[in-house]
Image: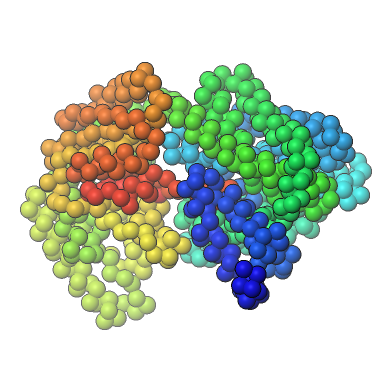
Amino acid sequence: MEQILQQIPKGPIVAFTILLLVILIVPPIFERLRLPGLVGLLTAGIFLGPDGLGVLNAESETMKLLSDIGKIYLMFVAGLEIDLEDFRRTKNRSLGFGIATFLIPLIFGMTIGRFFNFGWNASILIGSLLASHTLLGFPIVTRLGVTSNQAVTVTIGATIFTDIAALLVLAICVSVSAGEFSIASVVMQLVILAVYSIIVLVGFDRVGKEYFRRTGDEQSNQFLFVLLAVFLASVGAQIVNVDRIVGAFLAGLAVNDVVGHSPVEEKVEFVGSTLFIPFFFVNMGLIINLSGFVSSLSSELFLTLGIVGALISGKFLAAFIAKLLYGYNWNETLTMWSLSLPQVAATLAAALVGKNAGIITDSVFNTVIVLMLVTAILGPVLTEKFGRNLTVPQTNLRKNPQNHEVETENVEFNLDNDNFIFKNLFKVVVPIYNPNTARYLIEMGALLAHHEKGVIVPLSIPKAHVYMDEPELKVSIKRSKLLLQQAITISEEFQAQAQPLIRIDDDLARGISRAAREQNADLIVMGWSPNSSLQARLFGNLIDNVFWSAHCPVAVMRLLDKPINIHRILVPVRNITPQILRVIQFAQLFADTNEAAVTLLQVCPRKTTDKEIALFESELSSLLNQSKSRKEVLIQTIRQDDVAKVIINQASSYDMLMLRSFRRRTAGGLAVSDVTSKVLSSVSCSLVLFGEPNSG
């Protein structure tokens, strides 16, 4: 083995290649073992580091650069993923819970530090390491459809306070460690930090909005602007004598409103979660001295148990106080606790800063690694367990009475509130390109338009050229006319009025979205294209971009048979939310056009009681009874922990499967899988992926 390792050349390119290989292979293996992917990256770092194969060195310039970028990017994404709208809606309760979930673990951590004879500065820093939290469970509550539950939004909003406060404590501890502590110096440091924070939060926000307004759809330049913002903020943090991760987190908050839920945000998070952030976690593994890690844990076992216990008990006590103050039930309380448990982003970054500054010892740093491993596993597991039992308050479902009332007598999607309302004209835009797949899409659009006494808009988009008299453009326009003529013929077969449209555009997604907006369309029906190429993963495929930019709902379809031959439709329902109700509405609309039957499938955990199942079915039936659809909807419940497996098996008995589309998020810098992606790659029947504006 040593001879083989000696044959491996040294240098930054080799190190970079090894890192890419690790990032590609290791996280999926650990996720199959139901362990977080970041645990795999840490393990790989230990295996490849000085105590393992020794092929990577944390002290090399390459690893230092990549790790620093990853650490900065990690904190930036932590700020970027915080939903400021949710925070504004629940800011008082978020602030209250934020103070509790910060101060109680801080005090517990300080007490543990003093008990084990650490100085005040080190004890305060240990407490601050327990005070923040990373939203590793956010993708889980998103998948469960309970993010609108107030307990969840309060916990997410509290992240802003806990992370900023923890980083502020870190900045003060570092300055104290450097021998710069005095009341005057601390006050001056706080004033400078406040001015710097205002410059970043207000200045970057205003400059960013103006830049995005001027650049329009130039996503590449907007992406570069965001990168420049985060590294400018990091450099600025160093100038005002605070750590770079403080600037990175503030930059994430500053550009949060600027990028919003847009393709630029997706690209920024994709690059970070795919490359830079994993580099940081691998480097964390490299700097762990395995022998010292084991010995320090054995010799400092009580310190480790004390810190882990202080974190778990402190976060629970904070959630319990929120229960008493705000009247949350136990499921909401325990979900708040589990969401605030994971200590990954700010904790690891701050611990590394504290270790490098000599404030905390190697034993404390190793304990923080154990803390991260325990909470990174325990937090998501508990969130999955308790989050299943959360409900979305009826006030959320009834913001607008049309949110859950299904009427199919003249359906139209309201452009003002993105919900179904009902008028006299229904427009379906159907982009067409491939003659082999266009017929079924046109048939689907024609069925819907005819049933609703509306119109179908077959749309063809020739790719624009620099000069409008280019021969290629003329050929494309001619081809578009032939496609549209075929679309008109198909529409006439279904007695649907057609308004064909040719639009010249340099971007297909923007062309579709703009044409739909100009036509005041109510629905876009598109064909399915797998997201398989590297370019599609990096920059988003056509479907992704239309989901982002469309003003109206989008139904992406893989039709394996004529729509008129589809008579059995399956719609999986996890929780009763406004989004899934609108998927059901669309299923009922299509069922009414084609005399089809709709079955709603609920897959619940094996431990779900009969009473809970009956309550769910009763609530769902109550909403369905308000529908004016002529078709009865069946509700089927199956107890099974593997949701994807059940959906795939059940779909084999149906003609069509309808799923709600939602964009995958990242947590702690690592992408997580979802049931939808597994189902899409395995089902053999016709598919509809239904997405709403900006839902992705």
In the image, residue 532 above or below residue 600: below
**Which residue is found at the position 37% from the left and 46% from the top?**
676
Left or right position of 195 against 46: right
Quadrant of the rendering where the N terminus is positioned: bottom right
**Which residue is found at the position 33% from the left and 58% from the top?**
530
- Residue 218, visible in the rendered structure: yes
In the image, residue 658 above or below residue 268: above
Q: Residue 249 location in percent, x, y? A: 66, 49
Left or right position of 50 against 380: right
Q: Residue 203 location in percent, x, y? A: 66, 53
Which of 160/614 is in front? 614
Colour scheme of the picture = rainbow
Q: Residue 473 location in percent, x, y? A: 27, 76
**Which residue is found at the position 21% from the left and 68% from the top?**
480
Q: Residue 617 location in percent, x, y? A: 31, 24
Which of 599/520 is in front? 599
**Which residue is found at the position 36% from the left and 69% from the top?**
506
- Residue 555, visible in the rendered structure: no
Which of 192/290 is in front? 290
Which of 640/616 is in front? 640
